[in-house]
Amino acid sequence: MCAARKIKLFGFDVDGTLTSGMLIFNSLGECHKVFNVQDGMGITIARKLGYKVVFITGRQSPMVEARAKELHVDQLIMGCVDKVEAMDSIRQAWNLEWDEIAYMGDDINDLALAEKVGIFAVPANACADNLALADLIMKRNGGEGAAREFIENIIRKQARWEEALHLFI
């Protein structure tokens, strides 16, 4: 059976995956991030089809909190030191197996999840170590539609893309 067929949860790192990884600080020291609307649509599609969506990030950010709220993600974990522990807690709470989780991360703090989840995906501009362990390498960079590409890839492999289209047509 194709690994994609089992996926019920999409997990995402934020900086470098849902954003370009660029941090913009203003004169007051406030950090700003840019999110991609196509990634947002992909997350919306996933949620409407009944998938769980979680963000797990090592940073604290009111912008990430606002984006997660806007997209109605099922869980947001910020300031995370151990992403495997965080995902394991989520997995157990929702009674999921590791192979039912697809996760996308761009840097070495995501690598421990590569060995656990059913599908480990990376944006095109992920670090070399992540690229080497990836099950899926997106054509798009982080913050430039890679998350949408990832979600759509899984949904198509599950033969649910027509169902997704009918949510909007």
Image (tube, rainbow, N blue to C red):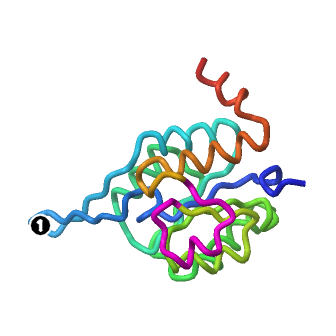
Q: Residue at x 42, y 40 (%)?
A: 37
How far across and how far down the image is residue 89, in percent?
69, 72
Disc 1 target residue: 28
Task: In the displayed orientation, state which residue is furthest to the right.
Answer: 1
Please check the rendered image and state whether residue 41 is part of the magenta-colored stretch, yes or no. Answer: no
Please check the rendered image and state whether residue 125 is part of the magenta-colored stretch, yes or no. Answer: yes
Residue 28 is left or right of residue 98, and the answer is left
Q: Considering only vertical position in the picture, is 167 above or below 19?
A: above
Q: Which quarter shows the N terminus?
A: bottom right
Q: Secondary structure at mark 1?
A: loop
- Residue 95 vs residue 106, the one in the foreground: 106
The amino acid type, in three-letter code, at marker 1 is Leu
| Residue range (magenta) | 123-138
How far across and how far down the image is residue 169, in percent?
60, 17
Q: In the picture, residue 70 is in which quadrant?
A: top left
How far across and how far down the image is residue 61, in percent?
35, 64
Task: In the displayed orientation, state which residue is furthest to the top.
Answer: 169
Q: Residue at x 78, y 68 (%)?
A: 98
Task: Count neighbours of disc 1 (C-alpha within 10 A) and say few if under 14, some if 14 to 19, many if 20 or more.
Answer: few
Q: Residue at x 47, y 60 (%)?
A: 17
Q: How many marks?
A: 1
- Residue 18 vs residue 61, the one in the foreground: 18
Q: Residue at x 62, y 47 (%)?
A: 151
How far across and how far down the image is residue 147, in percent?
53, 51
Q: Considering only vertical position in the picture, is 28 above or below 168?
A: below
Task: In the displayed orientation, state which residue is furthest to the left.
Answer: 27
Q: In the picture, residue 131 is in which quadrant?
A: bottom right
